[in-house]
Amino acid sequence: MKTFRNLALGTLLLPAALSLHGSTFVGDRTDFRDETIYFAMTTRFYDGDPGNNTYCWDGVLNVNDPEWRGDFKGLIDKLDYIKALGFTAVWITPVVENASGLDYHGYHAINFSKVDPRYESDDCKFQDLIDAVHQRGMKLILDIVLQHTGNFGEEYLCPMFSRDYTQPLDNINKSMKLHDNTRLPANYNSLPANQQYGTRLALMKNTDGKNHDVNNYWHHYAHFGWDDPSRWWGQIAGDCVDLNTENPYVTNYLVDCYTKFIEMGVDGFRIDTAGHISRLTFNKMFIPQLAEAAEKNKDKRGGTPFFMYGEVCARSEEVIYRGENYNCSPCYYTWKENLDYAWDMDEHSWDNIVVMEGEKGNHTNANSVNKQGEDDLGHSPSILRKSDNAWLNGNDYHAPDHSQHSGLNVIDFPMHWRFSNAKNAFNAHNEDNLYNDATYNVVYVDSHDYAPNGADGQRFIGDRATWAENLSLMFTFRGIPCIYYGSEIEFRKGCPIDKGAVLALNESGRAYFGGYVEGDVTVSDFAEYSNATGNLAATLSHPLAMHIQRLNKIRAAVPALRKGQYSTAGCSGGISFKRRYTDATTDSYVLVTISGNATFTGIPNGTYTDVVTGDTKTVTDGKLTATCSGKGNLRAYVLSTDKTKAPGKIGDDGAYLYTGKSVTPETKPYDGNQEPLDTTTKRDGTTPDPEPENPVDPSMEKGEQGAFFENTGHWGGTINAYVWTSTGTVTASWPGEPCTYLGNNIWKWHYSGDKRIPEGAGIIFNNGSAQTSDFSWVNGGFYTLDGYDHTVEGAGEIPETPVTPDPDETKWTIYFRGDNGWNPVCAYVWDSGDGDRQILGAWPGTTMTTTDVNGVSMWTISFTASLKSPMVIFNNGNGGAGNQTADLVLTNHTVYNADGTSSIAAISSENPLKIYSAAGNLIIESATEMPVAIYSADGTVRLVNVHPGVNVIDTLPHGFYIVAGTKIIL
C-alpha cells in the first residue's frame, strides 16, 4: 500500500511493562472485560496548562470559559483521581488536528496524521500521556473517527487550509490560511459565509454539479434515512462530511494514521459513528488491518489484547433497531461476513469513475455494500446470527466460540436507551444471543451525546438512588462498565447535554469539571488511596463516588463479575442472575440480586460468602435465599471453589451498599471555587464594531418598518435579521440582512422595501452561526435573547398601500451567474435608443454585488432609469476576449451568464415563488422557470430548476430546510 509522508506523531517510546495484577484484582487482567472505563472529554476535564487555552470562533456564548481548556497535562495530573475511583481505563475524545467553529471535542478532523497542538504543552505530548497511563497500570482508549472529516477539507485528501498557530485560534480569518495547494477560488475570503461553506462542500461532494472530487475520496450521496442502510452513505451533519470508506486509498490512509497511535501504545479504539459505515467495509478495510497492526505492536501495551468498540447509534430499546432493520443494529456489527462479496483493494480503482451528487458510484465495492444492504434488510429469522457465548450452560461455563466474531465490539445502545431504571435495562438481556458475545458490550447510562430514553437530550435526570441502582447493575452484570465524567457527583444533572453554539458550555452536560478535582491524592491501588485534599477530596467523598469505588473493588475481586457467562434460570428476584468464569487457574461463581430479595435454585452446593455483608451460607440442597432491601443495594454470594476462594466482605458500608441500614459517610465540603472562571484567556474573534462616540438611542420614524436587538450574548461579528412570512422571505435569504450598530450592544434592522410586513411574520437575529429562537414580528419591537421585550417609542401604523415609484422611471434589477469565475463583475449599461447614453457610468460600468436568488449565488445590480432600447455588457473590469460578454439586450429581472441570456426565464418581482409543504412533499409554485437552492440542516445544498406552475419535490427526507430563504419542515 501507499506510504504517506510525514505521519510522525511524536517519538515512539517503549512504555514500562503494565502492572496487570494488582492487589485489588483476583485473577489476571487477560482481556478488556477486566477493565472499567472512565470517559473524559479532554478539553472539558482538567486544565493542566492554562497557557494553551483558547476559544473556538463559534463559541460566542462561552465567556471566561474557553472551549479548549483541559489538555494532556491536565489528564496526567488527574489520573490518580480516576484510579482512586477504581477505574482501570480512560477513554478520551479524538486527538487529531481539527477545524470547525466548535471543534473542542475532536470530531471534525482536518489532518488525521497530526495530533492537535492545542492539547499539548512544551513539556507534555501525547506520548507522555500514554506513558503516564501505563505507569499506573491503567489503559488508554482513544476515540477515533473513520466515517467523516470536518468541512474544511483534509490535509492529504483535499487540502484547503493550514492552521496558523501563531495567530489567535478563535479568529477564523487570522488562523485559517488558504493552503498552498488549495483548489478554493481566489475570491474565497470575500464570499459570504454560506457561500464559503457551499464552495468547500462542493470540492468534497460535487454539490455544485461539477466533478471536483475526481478521486472520490468522499461520498456524494445526497439523501439518506437514519433507519436504513442508506445511512452508510450520508452526511450526518454540516461539520461531518462523509468519507468514501469504500475507497481503498481513503481507508489505507486512515489505517496508516491510526496505526501510528497503536505504535505509540494506546490500548484500544472507540470508533465514532460506526453505524454510518457498512459492516462489510469494516470487515474488509478496517478491522483486519488495525488488528494486524495491534498484534505487531502488542509489546507497546504490555502484551495485552487490543480492544475496539464502535458507536453504532441506535436510539431504540430493541436489540433489533426499532424492531426493523438488522443491519442497522449494534449486534449486527459484532459478526464476520457469512456471504462472499466481491471487493477491489486497488487504491486507484475509483479514480476514473464520475460520481455526481446523489450517486453512489458504479464500483465493485459500492455495489457490494449495496448488495449487503439488501441481503440483511429487515429482521427475518433467516438472516439473524445467534450465539450462546454470553450464556451459561446450566451452571457451567463453556468455552466461547469467537470464530465468527468480527473483531469489533459495540456500545450497548439498547441497554443505554433503557437505563431510565435498572429493571428496564436488565430486560435487554433477553436478546443477548444476537451479539457474538454480549459480555464484551460497553455499557453506560449517559454520555456526551445522549441519555436514556424519555430525557435523552439531558444528563441523567433520575434521582440519586436510581443512579446507584443503575451502577449496581452495570458493575455486576455482563458488559464493561463506563462512566461519563462528572457522573460520580451527578454533575450537571438534567442539563442539556449539548446544543452547539446556542448554549454556553457551562450550562450544558459538557461543562468544565476541573474545579471539582482540584487537590491531590496518594493512590496505592485501584480505589485504594489516602491523603486526599481540596475539592478532589470532596468529590471522592460524594455518595455516588463512594458507591462507584466500592463497586469497582467488588468487580475486581470476583472474576465472574468481569468475564463470566450468566443465566437467569432458577433466579427468582426482580433483578437476579448467576455468573461463572473458568480458566486454567480460575473457577469463579457468583449469585447476584439487586434492590430486592431473591431465591436461587438448582445451584452448586458449597460455601457462599456475600461480598457486601460478609454473610456466609452453606448450601446442601442446591438452594440459596438472599435477603436484600434498599434501592441500589445488592448481594453477591461468591462460591468458594478449589481454584478461587470467596473474598469475603469487600469495602465499608455506605449509602447504597450496606448490611442492615444505609450508612451516610462523612461528606467533605467544597471550597466554593469548584467552578472557576478563566479570566486570563482572551477572545480575539472577529473585529468588533467600534463603539460609536455617541451611542444612538433606539427610535423609529413615522411609517418606518424595523426592529431592534440587544446582543446580551456578546456574539461576535455583525448581527443579521432574517424576516419571513408564510408566503416567502422579507429579507434576503438566510442569514438575512445586516443590522446597524447603535452602541450599547443594540442593533437596528431597517426595512428598505416597499411592502407592508404583515402580522404573523417571523424574525430571527443571528451572526451567521449563533442565533435566537423564532420570534413573532412586531414593528419597532425591541428584542433580547429571550424574545420580544417592548415596542420602541415612535413606531406607528404602516400604511396598507406603499408609495409607488415615479411612473416615468423604472426600477431595473438584473443578475449575472458567475460560473466563469469572474471577480468582480461589472455591468456596463447604455441606451442605444437615446444616443448611446451611459446609464451606469463609463466603461467598465458599475461593480455588481453578490446576492442569493432563491438560494442560488449570483451577482446583481439595481438602478432606476427611463430607457428606450437598453443594452448591457458584463465584464470583469477589463475588455477583450474572455473578459466580457457580447452586447446583450437588457431585459428587466433576467439572469445572464457569460454566453448571454441564460436558459432561465426572467425572475419577476411581481411573481414571487410560493413555497410550502403538503403530504410530506415540498411544493414550489412559480410563474417562470428558475433555479432554486434547497439547504438542509446538515448543510447539504440541492439545486433544482423549477418550471412554471406547481412543482412537487418528493425526494426529500423528513427534516428542516431553507428553500429560497423560506423555512420549511417536512
Image (cartoon, rainbow, N blue to C red):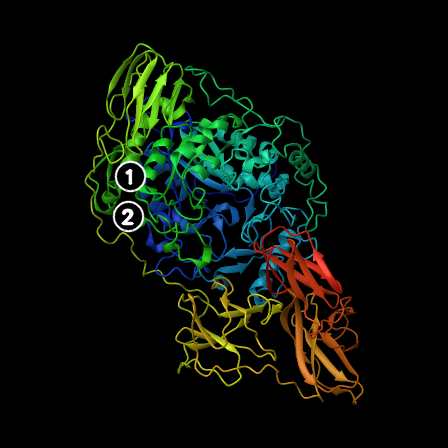
Numbered label attached to residue 516: 2
Give residue 622's quadrant in the image. top left
Numbered label attached to residue 759: none
Where does residue 497 sit, x and y in percent of width and height?
42, 49
What is the crowding at mark 1: few (fewer than 14 residues within 10 Å), some, or many (at least 20)?
Answer: many
Q: Quadrant of the N terminus?
A: top right
What is the crowding at mark 2: few (fewer than 14 residues within 10 Å), some, or many (at least 20)?
Answer: many
Residue 167 vs 412, above or below: the answer is below
Q: Which residue is at the far top?
A: 620
Q: Amino acid at mark 1?
A: Ala
Nearer-the-camera pick, 676 or 954: 954
Q: Residue at x 28, y 33 (%)?
A: 630
Where does residue 326 sit, x and y in percent of width and height?
58, 33
Q: Residue at x 33, y 14 (%)?
A: 623
Instruction: Residue under label 1, please give it.
Output: 545
In 3D space, how far apart are the residues under numbered discs 2 and 1 (Cα atoms)? 12 Å
Nearer-the-camera pick, 757 or 15: 757
Instruction: Give the side of residue 166 with respect to residue 675, left or right.
Output: right
Q: Is residue 685 in view?
A: yes
Task: Tell me how many marks there are.
Answer: 2
Choose the circle earlier in sequence order: 2 or 1.
2
